[in-house]
Amino acid sequence: MAEAPSENLTAPVGPLGQTRLTQTESANKLGTVMLVHTPNTGDPVALLAVTHNMQTDLFEQGIAKNIGKAELMAYRLGWFLYPPDGGAPVLREGKFINLPDDGIKPGGQFKVPAQQVSPILSNDHVMVVSFIEEAKFADGTDWKADIDQVRDTYKNKLDTEIIPSIEKTLAERPKQ
């Protein structure tokens, strides 16, 4: 069984529209790939970066940005857990987080606190995708991510790109 690294791993901030990937070691033979969801056109909030701690919290902290047109007042994170056997991904949801009274203005970035996502989940899941699931704005509008689209996009990516790449890397490693 691979031992979890003691250092924190950060999925790097990248331009909107680019998937950011961090692969970590975990108890399953493929490791665990940590992804930050790339927002879709029209999404008003984007998760830009996540720090993962493979010993205490798979979502230790993050940075997000209000890319909408109204002040952001509250949000909820979601994450999909993908099993290595190709089974159905599991959706987990965080709690709504209220922002300061004046909210986050359009274009503003904000820190996302730890979500208490147990690292033990990585033992049974080969990929975790974090994303902003819901948002509430000062103008009274609410927004919810297209859950089916998020789930299916990364399920396809897992099946066609990530697992084959990891298996190839493992096959090319020298035998110990």
Image (cartoon, helix red, strand yellow):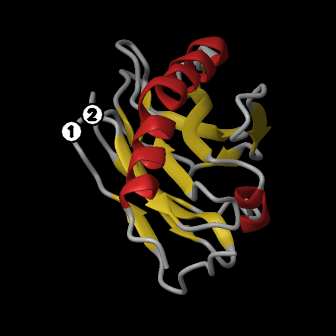
Specify the quadrant that holds the N terminus.
bottom right
Q: Is residue 109 left or right of residue 153?
A: left
Dot label at residue 18 = 2
Residue 85: x %, y % from top left: 73, 35
Q: Which residue is more in the foreground, 109 or 50?
A: 50
Tell me if residue 7 comes above or below residue 134 in the rendering.
Answer: below
State the image quarter where residue 150 is shown: top right
- Residue drawn at x 55%, y 37% is 131
Q: Amino acid at mark 2?
A: Gln
Tell me if residue 86 comes above or below residue 113 in the rendering.
Answer: above
Of badges 2 and 1, nearer the viewer stands 2
Residue 19: x %, y % from top left: 34, 36
- Residue drawn at x 35%, y 13% is 41
- Residue drawn at x 39%, y 65% is 173
Instruction: Give the residue number, with chain letter if any, for mark 1.
Output: 15
User: Does any portion of residue 50 appear in the rendered image?
Assistant: no
Q: Which residue is more in the foreground, 69 or 52?
A: 52
